Structures are given as structure tokens and as C-alpha cells.
Amino acid sequence: MRGEDKAGLAAGFERLSELSRYRRFLSPTARLTATQLAYLTEVDHHDHEALVAVEPSSRHGLGVARYVRSSEDPDEAEAAVAVADDWQRRGLGTLLLRRLAARAREEGITRFTGLVLESNEPVRHLLRTLGDVQERAAPGGTIEVRLQIPEDPLGEDQGRLAGWMGAAARGLLGTRLHGAHGDGRAPAAGADAIAPRGER
């Protein structure tokens, strides 16, 4: 994710269902403001990382995974995974979460936290695929989740892909958000998701 991806991200958000937007931001969200777009795209790839999944042939955005490091505990970060409506429950969320966990480990982060709607069982299950999840009731029908990131979230056979993701994070690869024909299509900004507090 790069600062120049604002228009593409806004376009991706417009294609989301109302439910996906609500699950992502934990409140009714009709559109992304200029402030939100700046926050979501202008990341430093160290304390704030955002990884993008695209469909190879069309270059359409399919999902975003991000973490934001805690200002109080550098070993901890709030995480979010968002997948476009028509790609939910197809394994992409799991893939994104594992890639995000690997990037977090590279940057010295060992725990993920976040808020999830209590009724959002798909994302609660998604988190459990990564490890044991601690849950605590929170206001507004949400639960606070916390999990320890495994030392090898990708597995040995994913080493090369982790290296590729690291190169992308360091800016050695071009942005992947824009369509092959420059249509500005971008990953979904919301879907079944955990939501960092800084975005609410």
C-alpha cells in the first residue's frame, strides 16, 4: 500500500456491501474521508504495514491486511484483515493473515490484538487458524481479541513468498493496486475483519 493508492482504495470501498463496511469499521460507514484515506494508505511499512492481494489477470484488488504497532508496547500491534465480498470464505483471509503475521515478526511484533463484532464468527474462526485466541467482552457488542503470533506463521515452504513480501514492503516492487488498464480498482477496504482502534 502506498500514498498514491488513495483513489483506488476509495473505489474499492464503494464496491463493498453495507454489511462488509460495518464489519470492517464497526459502525455505519458510507464513504472514506480524506483523513481515513491518508491514514490507510500513507504507511511506513514498519510500525504500520498494509499488504494487498490482487487478482492476477484483472489486477483487481481482493483484500487488504494491516497492522499498526502499539505506542505503549512495541511487541504488540492491532491487526485487521479485509476481503472483498465475492472472495470471502475462499481462504484468502487466512492467506493474508499469515502473510501479515510474517511481516509483523520481521519487524519485531509478537502479538496481535483487535476488536471483532461478537456476531462475526467467520473472523473469529480465521484468527483461531493462526493460534490460540484470548477473547474478552468489550462495549457495543464487540470482543477484544489477543493472540501470540507463531514464530513461523507461513511454514517452511512459504519462505520465498515471505521474502517477496518483504521486498514489496521495502519499496523494491511497484504498487499492485492499479488495474492493467489504469482503472484504479483497489482492494476492498472492508469485509469480515478485525478493526484497529486508530481507524474508528
Image (cartoon, helix red, strand yellow):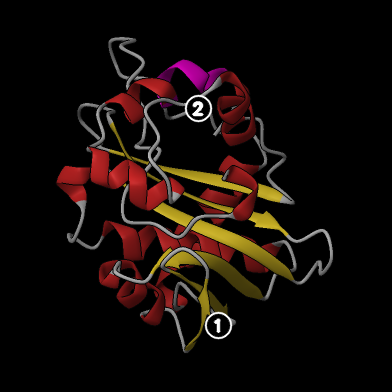
Q: Report the residue at 39% width, 57% height from top.
A: 193
Say whether residue 77 is left or right of residue 190.
Answer: right
Q: Nearer the viewer, residue 174 or 92?
A: 92
Q: Quadrant of residue 121?
A: bottom left
**Residue found farthest to the right:** 72
Q: Is residue 172 visible?
A: no
Q: Report the residue at 51% width, 20% height from top.
A: 6
Q: Position of residue 186 (x, y in %)?
A: 36, 27
| Tag 2 residue | 175
Q: Is residue 158 visible?
A: yes
Element on which disc 2 rests: loop
What main secondary structure does the magenta stretch of the protein show? helix
Q: Are marks 2 and 1 in contact (CB under 8 Å)?
A: no
Q: Report the residue at 65% width, 47% height from top.
A: 198
Q: Report the residue at 61% width, 61% height from top.
A: 78
Say whether residue 65 is left or right of residue 67.
Answer: left
Element on which disc 1 rests: loop
Amino acid beneath label 1? Pro
Q: Position of residue 81 (x, y in %)?
A: 42, 55
**For residue 126, which numbered disc appears in the image?**
none
Q: Position of residue 13 (x, y in %)?
A: 35, 30
Say whether residue 44 is left or right of residue 89.
Answer: right
| Tag 1 residue | 150
Say whether residue 197 is left or right of residue 89.
Answer: right
Q: Earlier in the sequence, mark 2 or mark 1?
A: 1
> Magenta residues, as a range?
4-9
Amino acid beneath label 2? Thr
Q: Quadrant of residue 67?
A: bottom right
Characterize the local packing of mark 1: few (<14), some (14-19) or many (20 or more) Cα atoms within 10 angstroms.
some
**Total tally of numbered discs in the picture:** 2
